Structures are given as C-alpha cells and as structure tokens.
C-alpha cells in the first residue's frame, strides 16, 4: 500500500477495450487467465492494494461489461470501482472515463492488460505528475532497430535515442481534462500525444521491464513466468 501523504486525490482510469485479435482468442484478452485469474483481475488488484483510498474507473466496451463478473468473483470482498462504457477509439474511451473526475486531482491512465504494475512505478508516476504536470514511464530499447525505407531496404536507427513507452501515464487533471475536451485527431495514439497537442511538455520517468502489455500468446507465456517469480 502506498501511503497518501498529500491531500491531492488520485484517480485511476483503467482502459480495457482490447478484443484479442493478435491473441487469436474468442475471449477478449483482458479476460484471459494468468495464474488461474483474468488478466484484468491482476491489474485492478494491483491498484486497489497500492491505492486503497483512490477511485478506480474501469472503462470497458459496453458489450463486454457483462463479463466483468468473471473478474469480480476473484475478489474476497466488494471492490469500490466505477465502470463506464468505452468508445470507438482509445481517445473516446479515456474521455468517457474522465467525465466525473474533478479539477485539482491526479489521474493515472493505465492499460488493462498491463497486470504487473508495481507500487514503485505507481509512486513515481504520482510524484512525477505532482512535480511536472504530465509524465509517462519509459524503458530503454534493447533490440537493434531499423527503419523501413522501401521494399527490401531499411536504415539503422540509434536505439540509444529511443524509448518504449508504458502506462500508467500520469497527469494533473487540470492539464488532462482540457486536453480531452478537444476533438479527436488521428495522431492521438495515447494520452501523452493528446496533451502535447496543446503545447504541454510531457516528461519521461523510469518504467519497469516487468510492466509488460499482454497482446500475443507469447506475452501470455512471459506473464505466467513473471507471476511465478512474484509468488
């Protein structure tokens, strides 16, 4: 549990709108099991334990909300959580999740299929948002990277200048709410790009290599291994 030494309230928006296309599963990936429990259970549980006084807002496609019981049955007691319907894009889904969040608060926006979020990363995210207004976790790219030029041709890219971005992306609500009041644009790939479109700088903080996003069958195998190491 993270002790809240500040009076600024923290809201957690968990976006779980994936359909599992790359997973090759009829069941949406957020409901697939790792360690015998749905991925989404592990994600919600991590925030509920770390921030018991904070409000969790879960964004799900409307037609998937009925599946939430698959997740809730694994909690020993009722969990305080608000569930809202998602939209056609991530931008719309996050916007729906922000509707009842007040000014003068901290907002963490997290992928529902990143179940291994750590207390230390949550703490860094909150602290970063308080200090800088807008922060995103990032990790160094370890693979060699090349950029496609045309069919059969590519050029190397200096990986030392590249970072892989994770969630939670953390913001002061006074920054995030006005950003999501604007119209959707194709270049909005995450919350950071929405905020940056208003000319606001977004700082990077240290991410966590275990904070993987589960999108493929190979990711599921890695997730099971991470879970075993955590037990």
Image (spheres, grey):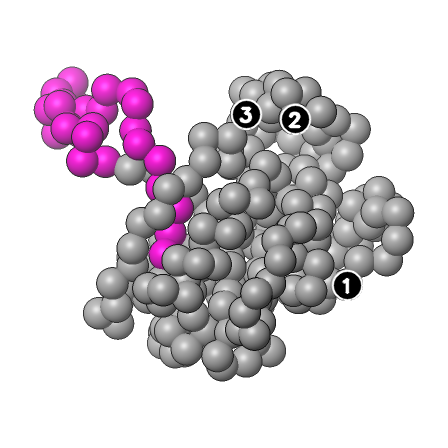
Q: In which quarter of the image is residue 154?
A: top left
Residue assigned mark 3: 219
Residue assigned mark 1: 80
Residue 97 percent coordinates (x, y): 57, 67
Residue plotted at (13% across, 23% down):
156
Mark 3 touches mark 1? (CB < 8 Å): no
Q: Where does the C terminus fall, quadrant-wise?
A: top right
Q: How far apart are marks 1 and 2 (CA)?
A: 25 Å
Where is 221 relative to 215, above or below? above
Residue 135 percent coordinates (x, y): 36, 56
125 to the left or right of 63: left
Q: What element carries label 3?
A: helix
If you read the primary sequence from the N terminus, does the residue marked by circle 3 or circle 1 appear first? 1
Instruction: Tell whether position 230 is magenta.
Output: no
Q: What element carries label 1?
A: loop
Residue plotted at (59% across, 37% down):
116
Q: What stretch is highlighted in magenta?
A: 135-162
Q: Is residue 86 visible?
A: no
Q: Distance between the residues labelled 3 and 1?
A: 29 Å
Q: Quadrant of residue 181?
A: bottom left
Residue plotted at (45% across, 36% down):
208
Where is 122 relative to 20, above or below? below
If you read the primary sequence from the N terminus, does the residue marked by circle 1 or circle 2 appear first? 1
Within 10 Å of the Cα at label 3, are there few (<14), some (14-19), or many (20+) other Cα atoms? some
Residue assigned mark 2: 230
Where is 109 relative to 119, above or below? below
149 to the left or right of 126: left
Residue plotted at (58% across, 29% down):
23
């Amino acid at each position: 549990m993270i002790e809240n030494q500040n009076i600024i309230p923290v809201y957690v928006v968990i976006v779980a709108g994936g359909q599992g296309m790359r997973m090759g599963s009829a069941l949406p990936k957020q409901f697939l099991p790792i360690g015998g429990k749905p991925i989404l259970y592990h994600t919600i549980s991590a925030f509920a334990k770390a921030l018991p006084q904070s409000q969790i807002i879960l964004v799900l496609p409307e037609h998937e909300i009925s599946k939430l019981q698959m997740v809730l049955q694994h909690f020993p007691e009722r969990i305080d959580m608000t569930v809202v319907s998602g939209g056609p894009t991530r931008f719309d889904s996050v916007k729906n999740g922000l509707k009842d969040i007040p000014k003068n608060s901290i907002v963490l926006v997290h992928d529902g299929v990143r179940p291994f979020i750590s207390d230390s990363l949550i703490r860094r995210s909150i602290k970063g948002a308080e200090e800088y207004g807008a922060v995103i976790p990032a990790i160094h790219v370890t693979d060699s990277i090349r950029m496609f030029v045309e069919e059969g041709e590519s050029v190397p890219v200096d990986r030392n200048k590249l970072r892989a971005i994770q969630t939670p992306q953390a913001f002061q609500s006074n920054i995030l709410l006005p950003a999501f009041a604007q119209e959707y644009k194709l270049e909005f790939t995450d919350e950071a790009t929405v905020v940056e479109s208003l000319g606001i700088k977004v700082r990077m903080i240290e991410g966590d290599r275990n904070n993987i996003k589960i999108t493929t069958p190979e990711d599921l195998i890695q997730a099971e291994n991470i879970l075993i190491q955590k037990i």
